[in-house]
Amino acid sequence: MNQHDSDTQHDDVTEPIAAASVLLFHNDDVLLVQRAGGTMAGLWSAPGGHVDPGETDMAAALRELREETGLTASNLVALTTHIVRIDAAPEAPARIYEIAVFAGTAGPYCTPRASGDAADARFVARHDLAALPTTPGLEDLIEAARRVLANTDNGAS
């Protein structure tokens, strides 16, 4: 017998939540933060978070970068929209995040300081990335960002 109650409208996901993140590079190293709380606690990810009402994706990405690492960036490039599903507790709907991902390069003198939602923040060398527990899809996003930034640099005169 089907256990779905047709008289009740239960969605298994919530409305998408707008978020933004930044993949910031210093030479060949990428800036990552270790999540301090929530379902992704302990995992390494790009600095990022919710888009506030009335805020653009770019403004949110820059704000989250500053809040979580103390760093700023300019000349960010829109990379993609990354969809992340986080399954909640039983009987609760899953959350879907639509994350606007940006890529850019850091200035020559930058030292991240973890704060806000970040337990740690650091530039990670390419060869060290595989040893870190990361959020879903992060490694593919980093490689895509490297390609986009390499093409942007090659196209500059």
Image (cartoon, rainbow, N blue to C red):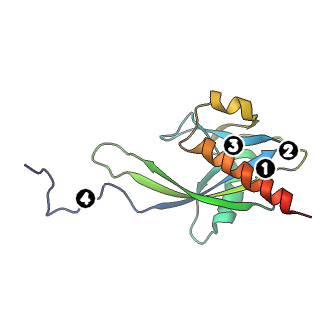
The alpha-carbon separation of the residues under discs 2 and 4 comes to 48 Å
Q: Are marks 4 and 1 in contact (CB under 8 Å)?
A: no
The residue tagged 3 is 115
The residue tagged 1 is 71
User: How many C-alpha atoms fall within 10 Å of the one at disc 2: few (<14), some, or many (≥20)?
Assistant: few
Q: Earlier in the sequence, mark 3 or mark 2?
A: 2
Q: Residue at x 80, y 62 (%)?
A: 75
Q: Relative to 16, say whether 22 is above or below.
A: above
Q: Depth check: 55 or 144 in front? A: 144
The alpha-carbon separation of the residues under discs 1 and 2 comes to 7 Å
Q: Earlier in the sequence, mark 4 or mark 1?
A: 4
Residue type, mark 1 in image: Leu
Q: Residue furthest top?
A: 131
User: How many C-alpha atoms fall within 10 Å of the one at disc 3: few (<14), some, or many (≥20)?
Assistant: some
Q: Residue furthest left?
A: 1
The alpha-carbon separation of the residues under discs 4 and 3 comes to 37 Å
The residue tagged 2 is 110
Q: Position of residue 61 (x, y in %)?
A: 67, 58
Q: Depth check: 149 or 89 in front? A: 149
Q: Residue at x 67, y 50 (%)?
A: 144
Q: Are marks 3 and 2 in contact (CB under 8 Å)?
A: no
> Which quadrant of the structure image shows residue 59?
bottom right
Q: Position of residue 40 (x, y in %)?
A: 52, 40
